[in-house]
Image: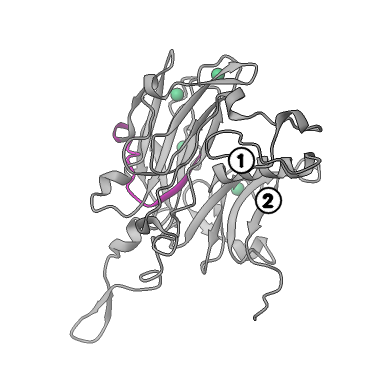
Amino acid sequence: MMPKITYLVTSLLLISILSCDKWNTEKTGPGMNNLPLKSAQVKGLFEYLDSNTSGLNFVNNMPDSMAIYVFMNEYAFNGGGVAIGDINNDGLSDVYFSSTFESNRLYLNLGNMKFKDITQETGVNGGAGWKTGVTMVDINDDGLLDIYVCKSGQFRDPAYRANALYINKGNLKFEEAGAKYGLQDISYSTQSYFADFDADGDLDMYLVNHPLGWPKKHALDASQDASGNIIPIEDTFRVNVSDRLYINNDGRYVDRTKAYGVDNIAFGLSAAIFDANGDGYPDIYVANDYAAPDYLYINQGGKRFKKETDKYFHNIPNNSMGSDMLDANNDGRLDLFVNDMMPEKKTNG
Ligand SMILES: [Ca+2]
Ligand SMILES: [Ca+2]
Ligand SMILES: [Ca+2]
Ligand SMILES: [Ca+2]
């Protein structure tokens, strides 16, 4: 999901506001200066643990550079994400943080809310490039959670955007196998979502992607023949911008984006995978920022998707920032929550 690290930090901040009797500016660790948090003062439903106590001392450091300034690159500050899962099946949830520019970090849960950074010995640092979302998934169905890291950024060499797949070999050993699985994707990725879209018993992948900026967003590459007929040209810009759908063929992932009808251009920030119409096939709701609306793709029997947003929703957000599924009213049916950054009323001046 889009900036999961942002959600985590935001959650900590909200907890502090709700729980503290007074503001406290004690330093609580690297990058946490001036947060109004102090363990001893927090009472209530949640207890604040500082990074010195938990060992979770990851910080997504961003260099002060014009090259990544938000007006030069709109998605520069999106993150960074976090995935939580039990990588060693000891019943304790472990934590993987994605760092935009520095090394990703894997923390092993030692119990009693203590964590140990095991990035170096496991080698799951994400490699070079600009890392974005991360997903823990048992991609080969061997009972061990694997880790898939998305990448984005404008690089001359697209290899810097090759997403990484770390296969869990057991005993805290991992092996990078993105190329082997066909998932060394070089598009501008935000986040990956795994589900059995074609209902053949293995996990396929929907990849939420984004353009780098506005200039070519609505452009059409075309030429004309001698009679004046417009001939569309394969839009290479769109190739790395569109969301992608990969179908799993016996452990080898194959790009079936166009065949499944999910070729699009939008500043995608997240997706929610659920069965919107109860037919047993997973459907996809994509939350998009800026001009393109959100998309609801209804699965057509595992063969393709049909965009049916208007059929299911009277209104959708204007500028979606993220989404999640939950049963908000406890009636047994999943509901959809989408953040919208736009106010209800726009005012000028
Ligand atoms: Ca564990
Ligand atoms: Ca596995
Ligand atoms: Ca499948
Ligand atoms: Ca469905």
**In the rendered image, which quarter contains the C terminus?**
bottom right
Q: Is residue 192 magenta?
A: yes
Residue 250 visible: no
Q: Which residue is mark 2?
A: 336
Residue 193 lies, in percent from the top left, at 50, 42
* Amino acid type at mark 2: Leu
Q: Residue at x 39, y 34 (%)?
A: 103
Residue 62 left/right relative to 17: left
Q: Is residue 246 above or below residue 114?
A: below
Q: Residue at x 39, y 28 (%)?
A: 124
Q: Which residues are magenta?
A: 179-194
Q: Is residue 62 above or below residue 97?
A: below
Residue 188 lies, in percent from the top left, at 38, 52
Closer-to-camera residue (30/161)? 30
Closer-to-camera residue (98/188)? 98
Ligand 2 location (quadrant) = top left
Tag 2 secondary structure: strand
Q: Please report contact status of discs 1 and 2: CB closer than 8 Å, yes or no.
A: no
**In the rendered image, which quarter contains the N terminus?**
top right
Residue 243 visible: yes
Q: Quadrant of residue 319?
A: bottom right
Q: Tell me the CA gap for discs 1 and 2.
A: 20 Å
Which numbered circle lies on residue 186?
none
Q: Residue furthest left?
A: 226
Closer-to-camera residue (343/68)? 68
Q: Which residue is mark 1?
A: 8
Q: Residue at x 44, y 61 (%)?
A: 264
